[in-house]
Structures are given as structure tokens and as C-alpha cells.
Image (cartoon, rainbow, N blue to C red):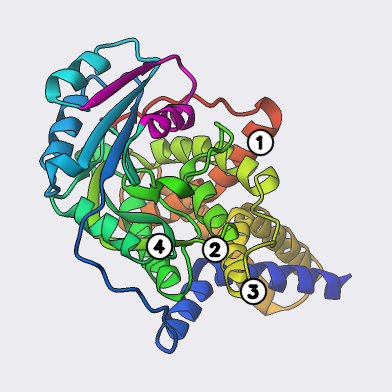
């Protein structure tokens, strides 16, 4: 029995360390010796449609349209489409007043269906997407479409920087730190092969590569691996930059990630991610390391904790008393982070709550399903 518990404990611990840290270190080492070549840019800019799906975004849509029209991109090559998903406020009116080329007023069907409708009506070679509250830097569009000079690229996402929407006691979210780490990992993935996930603030596809997916499955996760399966590359373009407000509190981030994971688990379990067909060995290992094991972290932590506790009860040795103390210290620090606004405690609280959100999202989807419609996270507008 002790041997079985030791195997379970160490296997779980190693997989947690691998997906959270070891994978990134391995990519960094590989990137020093191998790198995909990139076809040189022709210098000419392709026609681009920038699509903004919006639901009741009257507070920010005018600023978003103004930001898009101020991009350093030839106006005759840029088509700005605002797809209003069952808006009950003045989003459509304010988008028109601000200068959007096309404003679609659609019945409520969710973000994905609004984007699908906009792509069907778009008249440009490249279709780009952004959130209503995401602001692009002036040269972001040029940098983003530059990736498509490589004929192998079907999908490209830029760099989004999350900024605090509030100050003071409520500004406890540690997402910014995690996201900088995540972007560095995606940069390495892109240099070696293809990224395993994107983001909704700034990304684009070739119109011919665009894929209509189940409306509960977001583009951020479903597009990159599906592009690879269909023979395209999915790349990260750090020079294409955007900013977006993040949820102020860690507790709010937990709720946001819980909602996101209720859309993620259908992609993982029935959306084709688990099928290795079309991946190749290298990309398959990326999906396993960065996605499947990461989403399985709650179960790995639970196995490690229970196995460690039983090993201590069985008197397996001082080492296991130490590892159990470390695990309990992490949980204690997370609990204290709810009252004491100290950075190490806040980081522990962020890690524990966001890891728990992975399991909570699975519970929500399995119990109640997932709606295609969405509402903006509190504090991000």
C-alpha cells in the first residue's frame, strides 16, 4: 500500500511541477537550438476586417470604435464591423455615431454566433477580432497581419496586457503576473511550432481558415489546435499589443475563470483536443503539457494531498511530513490572503482559487451545461 501511495504522490507532484514550470523551462532550452523559419514579408498590407462582438457595451463601444479607426492602417483596407449580440441598450447607435463601417443588430445567440455572422458579411482577406473593452496600440494591426506574410500561418494572436481597473483594497488580482508568464510560454511555443491557446482581445485568421465552432466553445482555445489539425500554423505576435482591464479582485477572477472553464471543458472533452490526429509528436506533447495537464491540476493536487496525508499516517518518513507541511502551508497562505493584503499571500490565494476554478467550471458544465451568451465580468468596463 505504501508503495502505491508513494507512486501516486510523486507522479502527481512531478506532473504539477512539469505543467507549471518544467514545460516552460524545456521550451526555453529547445528554443535555443531549434526555431521555425519565417517567410519574409512582402511589405504590402492585406485588406482586413476588424470585428467587435458586443452585448450591451454602450459604455465603451464608442471608445473602441475610435481606437480602431485611429490604427495606423490604410483606411481603404480596413473594414470595421460591430456585431451587436441582442443588445438592449444603445450599443448599436453609439457604434454608428462613432464611425463603424457596418453595425449588425443580431438576436441574442452568443459571442461566437455574432462573430460568425460578421465573418460571413466581411469583404476582406484577413478577419481580425477584438473585445469591446480592449484597446489596440496604433501599430498593432500592422504587426498582427504581418504574420500572414508566411503562407503557413492561419491564425495569429497578439499580446494583451491586463491593467488594474481599480486601486486600493479591491485591487488584489494577481492575473497580470500570471499572464506575463503565460505570454512568455506562448512566445516559445510559437517559435518552436504553434501556440496552444490565444486570447480574445487581439487575434486574426485568414478568412479561408476561419472555422465555425459550437457556440459554447470560444475561439481562444478551439482555434489554435484546430488550425494545426487542418495544416496551418497558429502563432503569437508580441509586437501586436492591446490593453484590457482585468477583474479587480482575486475572488472576481475566480468567478471569471470558472465561467471560462465551463466553456473550456467542452472543447477539451468533446471538441477534438484530446484526439492526437493531425498534431504530430511535438505539438501533441505541447497540448498535453500546457493544456491537458494544466486543466487536470486540481485532480493532481487532490491526489498528492490525500496520498501524502495517508503516507504520514502510515509513518512513511520525515520527508513526507515536510511535503505535507508545505501543501498545508500553501492552503493556509491562501486562506490568510483573504484578510492580509501581502503579496506572497495574495499569490498563494490567486493560485489556489484559480486552480479550484478549473474544477468548478467542470462541475458547472457537467451539472447545468453552458450557455452560449455571455455578460461582461464585473469591473472590467
Q: CA distance from mark 2 to mark 1?
A: 21 Å
Q: Nearer the viewer, residue 136 or 212?
A: 212
Q: Residue furthest bottom?
A: 33
Residue 63 image offset from top left, x and y in percent: 15, 30
Residue at figure coordinates x 65%, y 28% from the top left: 369
Quadrant of image for the C terminus: top left
- 1 or 3: mark nearer the eye: 3
Mark 1: secondary structure: helix
Residue 267 image offset from top left, x and y in percent: 61, 44
Residue 205 image offset from top left, x and y in percent: 40, 49
Query: What residue would you read off at disc 2?
Result: 290
Residue at figure coordinates x 43%, y 48% from the top left: 336
- 2 or 3: mark nearer the eye: 3
Quadrant of image for the N terminus: bottom right
Q: CA distance from mark 2 to mark 3?
A: 14 Å
Q: Which residues are magenta?
A: 101-121
Q: Nearer the viewer, residue 141 or 12?
A: 141
Query: What residue would you read off at disc 3?
Result: 281
> Is label 1 in contact with label 3 (beta carbons under 8 Å)?
no
Amino acid at each position: 500500500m505504501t508503495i502505491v501511495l508513494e507512486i501516486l504522490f510523486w507522479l502527481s507532484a512531478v506532473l504539477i511541477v512539469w505543467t507549471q514550470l518544467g514545460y516552460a523551462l524545456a521550451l526555453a532550452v529547445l528554443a535555443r537550438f531549434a526555431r521555425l523559419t519565417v517567410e519574409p514579408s512582402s511589405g504590402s498590407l492585406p485588406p482586413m476586417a476588424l470585428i467587435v462582438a458586443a452585448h450591451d457595451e454602450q459604455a465603451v463601444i464608442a471608445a473602441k470604435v475610435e481606437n480602431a479607426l485611429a490604427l495606423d492602417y490604410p483606411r481603404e483596407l480596413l473594414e470595421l464591423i460591430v456585431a451587436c449580440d441582442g443588445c438592449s441598450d444603445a450599443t448599436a447607435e453609439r457604434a454608428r455615431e462613432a464611425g463603424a463601417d457596418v453595425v449588425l443588430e443580431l438576436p441574442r445567440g452568443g459571442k461566437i454566433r455574432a462573430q460568425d455572422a460578421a465573418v460571413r458579411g466581411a469583404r476582406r482577406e484577413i478577419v481580425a477580432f477584438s473585445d469591446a473593452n480592449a484597446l489596440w496600440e496604433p501599430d498593432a494591426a500592422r504587426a498582427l497581419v504581418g504574420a500572414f506574410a508566411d503562407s503557413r500561418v492561419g491564425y495569429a494572436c497578439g499580446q494583451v496586457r491586463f491593467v488594474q481597473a481599480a486601486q486600493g483594497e479591491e485591487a488584489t488580482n494577481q492575473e497580470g503576473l500570471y499572464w506575463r508568464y503565460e505570454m512568455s510560454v506562448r512566445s516559445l511555443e510559437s517559435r518552436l511550432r504553434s501556440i496552444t491557446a490565444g486570447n480574445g482581445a487581439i487575434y486574426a485568421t485568414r478568412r479561408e481558415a476561419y472555422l465555425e465552432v459550437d457556440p459554447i466553445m470560444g475561439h481562444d482555445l478551439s482555434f489554435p489546435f484546430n488550425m494545426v489539425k487542418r495544416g496551418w500554423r497558429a502563432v503569437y505576435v508580441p509586437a501586436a499589443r492591446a490593453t484590457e482591464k482585468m477583474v479587480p479582485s482575486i475572488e472576481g477572477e475566480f468567478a471569471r475563470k470558472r465561467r471560462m472553464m465551463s466553456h473550456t471543458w467542452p472543447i477539451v472533452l468533446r471538441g477534438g483536443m484530446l484526439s492526437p490526429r493531425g498534431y504530430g509528436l511535438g505539438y501533441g506533447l505541447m497540448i498535453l503539457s500546457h493544456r491537458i495537464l494544466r486543466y487536470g491540476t486540481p485532480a493532481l493536487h487532490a491526489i498528492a494531498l490525500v496520498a501524502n496525508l495517508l503516507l504520514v499516517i502510515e509513518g512513511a518518513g520525515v520527508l513526507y511530513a515536510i511535503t505535507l507541511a508545505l501543501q498545508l502551508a500553501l492552503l493556509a497562505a491562501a486562506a490568510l490572503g483573504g484578510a492580509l493584503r501581502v503579496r506572497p499571500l495574495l499569490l498563494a490565494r490567486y493560485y489556489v482559487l484559480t486552480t479550484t476554478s478549473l474544477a468548478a467550471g467542470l462541475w458547472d458544465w457537467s451539472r447545468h451545461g453552458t450557455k452560449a451568451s455571455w455578460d461582461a465580468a464585473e469591473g472590467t468596463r
